[in-house]
Image: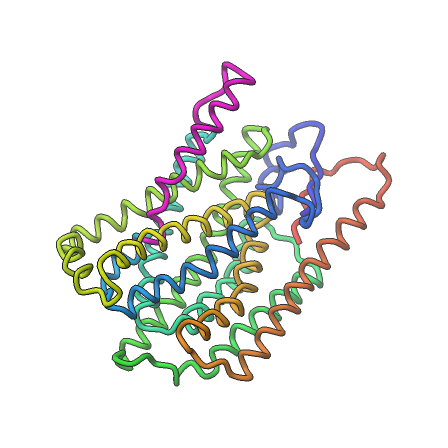
């Protein structure tokens, strides 16, 4: 991700045309040398590879509450106030006038809207996870990359190169190939209508998530354009706190209407791995999903929505392998080809990033700054 920081704030009409404005306050660094971005990648890897397996484990061993599953995907937000407070204390030592919150009212409102959309997305994904194997649900959810690319082009004027287009095509084809044999992997006890319901809801969740990512990037870009300040990870955590709280509130209302809170103790008693394992599984799932959400938000604000979609999609083969190991799901030749395509797409994307940064570094330093943000 290459960012050229202007000497003066550009006019409003130029601000709204920035292709990846969320990165406008980030220092110019290639992706592979940005430590915060690398930490975000690591959080995505840990969360994306473990959270779907934990959620599927909940269903396999006796769990059946869809609204509870939806809540688990956003309920990790109570982990965030402590680091936010530590960040505030650190800022306060440097400046006595530092604000408690870095978010503007407009960014707060945008985060609430994103949180509500996230709550709906979590519910759709929870239904898909209940009726589909991990491999199939992950494959379908990976189609969010195509939706992310389309919405990023419309909302944030995402700039594409031959390498990024190649990566999107390869990763999308790989995900589609994994779904070729999807009709034959219906879990035991799941009816055909339930299978296709889960199929449709997971696909809808992928489309909605593909819309959410560029909306987050756009809201961050507009905040930074108005505030004219540098991006900090504290801002990322604040946004995730609001999004997680709003999505959790949405799920809690659904649980109250559905009487889930009355059923949870009985479900814990009947859980085949034991009561203690039941609650441990819930806590672990919420924690892993929170790590993934933090990593994705950091990737968007220090990279782009498209980059987040690429990383999420390339992790599908890892989830596939883990599903084979833990749930004994079959690993066919088609899945092997999909793994190869995913790795190829991943290399293509980052080779394009490194090449773009090298070309930008070779430009004469006295060239006028055009206030552009180059997102590959």
Q: Hey, which quadrant is residue 265 in on the image?
A: bottom left
Question: Within the magenta stretch, is there residue 81?
Answer: yes
Depth order, front residue of 130/26: 130
Q: Position of residue 362 (x, y in %)?
A: 85, 46
Q: In the rendered view, would you say 174 is above or below 63? A: below
Q: Residue at x 30, y 64 (%)?
A: 58
**Magenta span: helix, strand or loop, mainly?**
helix
* Quadrant for the C terminus in the image: bottom right
Horizontal placement of 314 versus 374: left or right? left
Q: Position of residue 114 (x, y in %)?
A: 40, 46
Q: Position of residue 167 (x, y in %)?
A: 64, 65
Q: Hey, which quadrant is residue 124 in on the image?
A: bottom left
Residues rendered magenta in the picture: 72-101
Depth order, front residue of 40/18: 40
Q: Residue at x 40, y 70 (%)?
A: 134
Horizontal placement of 54 versus 296: left or right? left
Horizontal placement of 262 versus 228: left or right? left
Question: Within the magenta stretch, is there residue 66?
Answer: no
Q: Position of residue 47 (x, y in %)?
A: 46, 55
- Residue ranking furthest to the top: 96
Horizontal placement of 336 versus 186: left or right? right
Q: In the rendered view, would you say 158 is above or below 133? A: above
Q: How many marks?
A: 0
The way the protein has been coloured in the rendering is: rainbow
């Amino acid at each position: 991700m290459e960012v050229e920081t202007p000497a003066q704030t550009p006019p409003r009409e130029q601000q709204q045309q920035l292709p990846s404005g969320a990165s406008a306050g980030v220092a110019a660094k290639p992706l592979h040398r940005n430590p915060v971005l690398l930490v975000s990648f690591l959080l995505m890897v840990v969360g994306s590879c473990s959270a779907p397996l934990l959620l599927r484990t909940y269903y396999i061993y006796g769990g059946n509450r869809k609204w509870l599953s939806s809540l688990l995907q956003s309920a990790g937000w109570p982990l965030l106030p402590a680091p936010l407070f530590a960040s505030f204390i650190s800022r306060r030592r440097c400046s006595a006038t530092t604000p408690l919150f870095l978010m503007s009212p407009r960014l707060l409102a945008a985060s609430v809207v994103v949180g509500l959309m996230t709550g709906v997305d979590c519910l759709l994904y929870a239904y898909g996870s209940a009726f589909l194997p991990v491999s199939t649900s992950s494959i379908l959810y990976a189609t969010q990359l195509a939706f992310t690319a389309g919405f990023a082009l419309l909302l944030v004027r995402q700039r594409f190169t031959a390498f990024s287009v190649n990566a999107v095509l390869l990763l999308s084809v790989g995900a589609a190939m994994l779904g070729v044999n999807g009709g034959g992997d219906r879990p035991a006890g799941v009816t055909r209508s339930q299978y296709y319901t889960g199929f449709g809801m997971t696909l809808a969740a992928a489309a909605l998530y593909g819309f959410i990512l560029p909306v987050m990037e756009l809201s961050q870009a507009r905040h930074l354009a108005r505030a004219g300040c540098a991006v900090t990870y504290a801002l990322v955590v604040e946004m995730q706190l609001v999004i997680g709280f709003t999505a959790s509130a949405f799920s809690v209302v659904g649980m109250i209407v559905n009487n889930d809170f009355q059923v949870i103790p009985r479900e814990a008693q009947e859980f085949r791995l034991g009561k203690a394992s039941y609650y441990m599984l819930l806590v672990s799932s919420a924690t892993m999903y929170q790590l993934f959400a933090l990593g994705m938000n950091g990737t968007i604000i220090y990279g782009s929505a498209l980059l987040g979609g690429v990383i999420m999609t390339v992790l599908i083969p890892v989830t596939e392998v883990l599903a084979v190991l833990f749930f004994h799901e079959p690993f066919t030749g088609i899945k092997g080809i999909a793994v190869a395509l995913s790795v190829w797409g991943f290399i293509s994307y980052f080779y394009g990033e490194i090449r773009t940064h090298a070309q930008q570094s070779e430009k004469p330093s006295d060239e006028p700054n055009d206030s552009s943000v180059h997102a590959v």
